[in-house]
Image (tube, rainbow, N blue to C red):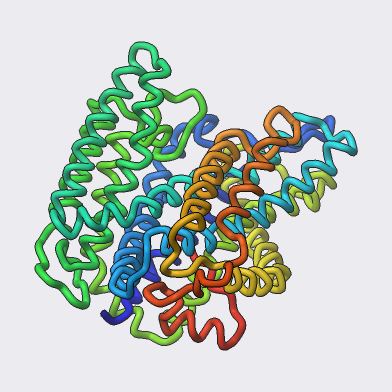
Amino acid sequence: MSRDRYVDFLRAWAILLVVLGHWLITGLIRHPDGEITAPEMLATLPWTQWLTLGFQIMPLFFLAGGHAAAGSWSRALAAGGTAAGWVGKRAVRLLLPTAVYSGLVLLAVGVCSALGVDPATLALVGWAMAMQFWFLPVYLLISALTPVLYALHERWGVRVPVGMGAAGFGVGALVAAGDASARGPVVEAIGALNYLLVWGVVHQLGFCWRDGLLGGGAPTARRARGWAPAMAVGGLAGFALLVGPGPFPVSLILVTGQQPSNTNPPSAALLAWSLAQVGVALLVAPVVRRVLERAGVRRAVRVLGAGSMTLYLWHMLPVLIVAAAFYLTGLAPEPRYGSPGWWALRVPWLLVLGSVLAGVVWALRPLERALASLDARVRPGAGLRGVAAWRIWAGLGVSVWTLTYFAGHGFAYGGEFPVWPSVGLAVGTACVALPRRRGEGSGGSGGEDGTAEAREARRVGRPTWTVPRK
């Protein structure tokens, strides 16, 4: 099956909007006593919640991830690979850069704590540096379930995401009812299922898209069907009903104190919006593919996609740098928060952050090359079995737990250093990324390391971290 550049575009477009969205909603205020705070824009300026309809782009991550995972797992399976080997390979590619990023942030937290930095400030910074982490444990779990989910897909096709979607709507309705009365631990536990059901639906639709079951101009379509218009129209209509007369807010990003929430856990409204977004993405695919025929566009997409993991992990660091350089020093103009003048300054704000991020990415290139080299040495073999396989599953479980903690609490909850979560992430990553033992084999065939892009990356020494194509 030939490479679909549109999948690369979706991944690049999604990472770009994630970065811009996080930067846009981050507004800093310097108080007379020198303290810097970051008001929650979606709560302070409620009308901005409508902007989340354009910036909640995570469905495209999971759609592109499902498309890529379907091809990679089917090739690995045909080559005799095991689930542990395939899942471990993907976990390594995600956990190595995440562990290094986390380690450096935690080192800074420890130093600042020892120097007596204000705990409230430390907690705020620690939260900002981990605000994107919610995606990581969810994607790791869905990747771990991919062998099972793909087997279901091979047997029942589109009926699998339809069934998962129905279950997701049911869980969302139960959580909404619980919020209307009193959310208890049972409702919380049931609601957590929607992290896998809602995002799993979109990931599963990526399987269907690759196999030509949804239409959308797939290069090789087995049984193309016109699901895209139905998803686009039906999803939009469902979202309007659930947000208008229904119980859900319009914001597709978490707003403190807002119940029910569309993202914590993912709601029926978010599922409807995800279906609409997938439908639209498939409908515009032929047009975008024609644009991607231009060499310059393809090159830009390739560069952005290749560095997506770095951008995803490190894009909040420029906010701290700019805050220290312009707000602590009082050099930044500070019109009233939310005023027309403040919004006009969002343009130079984004440009300055983009320039700083470019410098950060350039400075991280030696680290990326070292990680790419380490990845090649520790990547599990395609046919991993026995004790080594159990080591992968155990490490994955510990990593999911610690990443979930950081996603919910940040790197300095309460202004304190998170000892046990830090140990957990180190242990989990080590279990997954222990150097290969004799007899385990190499990364093996059947993975994305055999693609032309990966071979070219190895030739020039460029890392191939991507989100969410693991």
Q: Taking 146 as reference, is 247 above or below it?
A: above
Which residue is drawn at the image coordinates 58% and 73% (left, top)?
376
Q: Please indicate whether residue 243 sits to the left or right of residue 433 in the image.
A: left
- Residue 229 position within the rendered picture, expressed as x and y whole percent measured from the top left: 14, 56
Which residue is drawn at the image coordinates 54% and 30% (left, top)?
44
Residue 14 seen by the camera: no
- Quarter of the picture containing the C terminus is bottom left
Residue 273 location, quadrant = top left
Q: Please indicate whether residue 28 sits to the left or right of residue 454 in the image.
A: right
Nearer to me, 193 or 276: 193
- Quarter of the picture containing the N terminus is bottom left
Which residue is drawn at the image coordinates 83% and 36% (left, top)?
113
Nearer to me, 304 or 66: 66
Q: Residue furthest top?
A: 181
- Residue 203 position within the rendered picture, expressed as x and y whole percent measured from the top left: 31, 54
Residue 84 location, quadrant = bottom left
Residue 66 location, quadrant = bottom left
Which residue is drawn at the image coordinates 63% and 54% (left, top)?
430
Nearer to me, 451 or 30: 451
Residue 457 seen by the camera: yes
Q: Please indicate whether residue 410 sits to the left or right of residue 255 in the image.
A: right
Q: Please indicate whether residue 256 sits to the left or right of residue 414 in the image.
A: left
- Residue 179 position within the rendered picture, expressed as x and y whole percent measured from the top left: 36, 18
Total tally of numbered discs in the picture: 0
- Residue 157 position within the rendered picture, expressed as x and y whole percent measured from the top left: 15, 56
Q: Taking 458 as reference, is 322 above or below it?
A: above
